[in-house]
Amino acid sequence: MKKAEKIIGLIVAIVGVIAIAGYLIYNSLVVEVEVITLSGQSVERIIYCAGNVSAKKNEIVTYDGTIIPTEIHISVGDKVNDGDLIMTAYNSHMQKIKIYAEHNGVVTAISAAVGKESKYGTALAVIAKTDQMKVTVQVSENEISAVKIGQKADVTGEGFGQKKYSGTVTSISSIAEQSNSNGAYIPVTVDINGADENILIGMSAKVYIIANKIENAVAAPYSAIEYDGEKAYIYVADGNKISKVKVEIGTEGHEVAEIIDGVKQGDKIVKDKTKAKNNFRVRIKENG
C-alpha cells in the first residue's frame, strides 16, 4: 500500500513538473507586441531636394550717361540700404555726381572701376534684394511629375538655426539636366516666404515639397508594413492572435503610408512587424 502511494505521489510530482515545464515553454512562445488602432489622418507625399539660396530679384545699378568713377564706396558682400551712397563720379560734362542705392540688399558684383570710363547704361554694380529670396533645387526625373507650380514647401538649412520657413514652388524648368550618377534632374525654383537676416545668399538649403496631401486617410507607419518584392503586408491583431494581411499602398508620406485596401479604420495592427514574425501567440499591448 505504501509502495503504491509512493508511486502515485511520484507520478503526480512528475506530472506536475511536466505541467509546469509545459506552461513555462508555452508562455515562452508568447511575445508582447504593441498594437495601434488605425484612424483617419493626413498623409503628405514629401519630395526632398536640396539647393542654394539666391536673391529672387537684383538691382542693376546704372547711370544714364557716360561717367568716370572717382570713388567707389562699396565692396562685394556689403549690405546696403535704400539711399546709401554707392559711388561718386564725373559725368561727360565733368560735373561731379553721386550714385545711390535704390533698394536694401547685398552687393554681389561691382563692374565699375575708379578712373575707368563707363558708357551709358553700363552695369556699375549689382545689388541682390535680400527681402525676396529663393532656392533653386534639383528634382529627379522620377519625381518631377508630382511637382506643380503653387505647391507648398518647408525650407530649412544648417545655417538657418532652428527656424523653418515656408516656401512656394514658382517655376519648373522645361529642360532636364544630366547628373553624373543619378540620371536626369529638373531645376525647380522655390520662393522663401518671410526671408529674414538668418538667410544669406549662397547658403545651402533643404527643401521638402508637399506634392500631395490626403485627408482622413487610413495610414500605417512604415514600421508596421512588411514588403515582399512589390507586395505589402500588415499584421492585424484579433484578440491574442495575429494574421498577415496583404494591403495596397497609396500615397507614401514621410513617416506613414496611405493604405487604400486590405485594412480599415478601427483595425488593430502590430506596430513593429519584426515582432510579429513566426509568433504563435502574442500578448497585446494597446497604444492608441
Image (tube, rainbow, N blue to C red):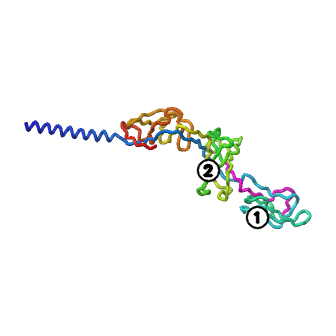
Residue 81 occupies quadrant: bottom right
Q: Earlier in the sequence, mark 1 or mark 2?
A: 1
Can you say whether 221 is above or below 83 in the image?
above
Kind of residue sitting beneath label 1: Ile
Residue where numbered disc 1 is placed:
74
Residue 111 at what x, y percent from top left?
79, 59
Residue where numbered disc 2 is placed:
206
Can you say whether 241 is above or below 152 in the image?
above
Can I make out residue 121 in this image?
yes
Q: In the displayed structure, does residue 133 sit left or right of residue 263?
A: right
- Name the residue: 79% across, 59% down: 102
Residues in magenta, as a range: 115-136
Between marks 1 and 2, how big is the CA–CA gap?
32 Å
Mark linked to residue 33 = none
Q: In the displayed structure, does residue 210 sit left or right of residue 110?
A: left
Residue 72 at what x, y percent from top left?
79, 65
Look at the image and tell me in which quarter the N terminus lies: top left
Say if the magenta span includes residue 123: yes
Q: Are there few (<14), some (14-19), or many (20+) residues within 10 Å of tag 2?
A: some
Say if the magenta span includes residue 257: no
Residue 94 occupies quadrant: bottom right
Q: Nearer the viewer, residue 236 or 158?
A: 236
Q: Nearer the viewer, residue 65 or 268?
A: 268
